[in-house]
Image (cartoon, rainbow, N blue to C red):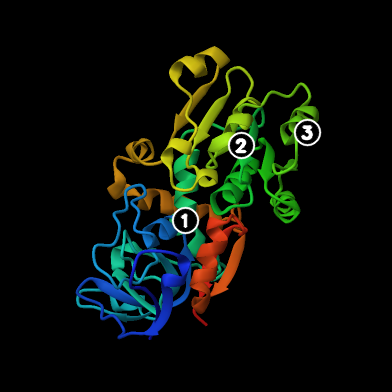
Amino acid sequence: MRAVRLHEFGPPENLSVERVPAPVPAAGQVRIAVTVAGVHLVDTALREGLRLGPAPKPTALPAIPGREVAGTVESVGDGVDPSWLGRRVAAHLGMVPGGGYAELAVTGAERLHALPDHVQEEHALAMVGTGRTAMGIAQFTELGPADTVIVLAAAGGIGSLLVQYAKSRGAYVVGAAGGPAKVEAVRGLGADLAVDYTEPRWEERITGQLGSRPATHLLEGVGGTLARTAVELLDVGGSHLGYGYASTGFDPIGGVSLSEAEAADRGITSQSVLGEPMFARIGGIENLRVLEDRAMRLLADGTFAPLIHHFPLAGAARAHRALQSRGTLGKVVLATR
């Protein structure tokens, strides 16, 4: 089979497509003929040999990256219900090395999500990693028609889902993204106001459009100066939820979480929700499936319509470069065929 392998930590060019033996499902596992594999920002950190979040760096090279796949079950190991054969599924493969950037991947049967006929595989793929994170963030909000929600990086994988989630709860949604194409995509997601945060004084456009409407929630995984500027838009009683620091590379210092004194002075709350705070809400990291199931339900009922940015399997290096340079829209996927 074809697979993308990493032989040495470093730049995207270290990812190469090779012919490798097909994996064999062990007891309790299935083998999936992969249609699409997910590419995540965490993958780029692990490619560089960094540690990011709960995922350790690969301990043995060469490794096949990738932790999210969708496709069709084509063989099963001992003890697996044979009715899985031929079914379309999506699955999060766990932490590294996941083995997802390949034409075939193995995983435990307990990780599978069977897909309804009307659900596209690439959309389901977006739910098992990115969607579950969006649902984890949503745990910290109680959104309704009285709310005005500002979403930064609103054209990204998580941000685009948060825009749709907030709209489904009746909130007024402001989506901020970088560049005209992304702003247009955010409008297409249903945002009431879409702004380009690469333009000077972008925040003034938001305040001008909102008028007397108070900004109640800021959802952002950007960090740095952009997040600091957006925090200033929150009204008294507002809530800032940070879930990353995309604008500052992989340096968590770039994440914005106001101190208790700063938050109290502004009359808002501010917290970083990624990692342990998120896991605590579901009873531990071992229960992440709960968030995947929530995301899958919202996909099935039409609440979520994920943006997908396609690359071929052989374009894994290009996908990594584009993701790190913030040149992608929505969920990034590698198509195997």
| For the residues bearing labels 1 and 3, Cβ distance under 8 angstroms | no
Neighbourhood count class around disc 1 (C-alpha, 10 Å): few under 14, some 14–19, many 20 upward = some
Residue 119's spot in the image, x, y percent?
55, 66
Give the amino acid at mark 1: Leu
From the image, state whether disc 2 or disc 3 is nearer to you. 2
When asked about the image quadrant of residue 58, the answer is bottom left
How far apart marks 1 and 3 lie (CA) works out to: 30 Å
Q: Decide if residue 79 is on the left or right side of residue 263.
A: left
Task: From this view, report whether residue 125 is shown above or below residue 16.
Answer: above
When asked about the image quadrant of residue 147, the answer is top right
Identify the mark at residue 205; answer none if there is no mark. Answer: 3
- Can residue 87 be seen in the rendering of this structure? no
Q: Decide if residue 5 is on the left or right side of residue 201.
A: left
Identify the mark at residue 41; answer none if there is no mark. Answer: 1
Task: From this view, report whether residue 334 is shown above or below residue 232.
Answer: below
How far apart marks 2 and 3 lie (CA) works out to: 14 Å
- Can residue 83 be seen in the rendering of this structure? yes
Residue pictured at 59% horizontal, 35% vertical: 225
Task: From this view, report whether residue 94 is shown above or below residue 241.
Answer: below
Query: Which residue is denoted by mark 2 in the rendering?
Result: 226
Task: Give the mark, 1 or 3, whose residue is nearer the N terminus.
Answer: 1
Task: Give the mark, 2 or 3, whose residue is nearer the N terminus.
Answer: 3
Q: Decide if residue 228 is on the left or right side of residue 47.
A: right
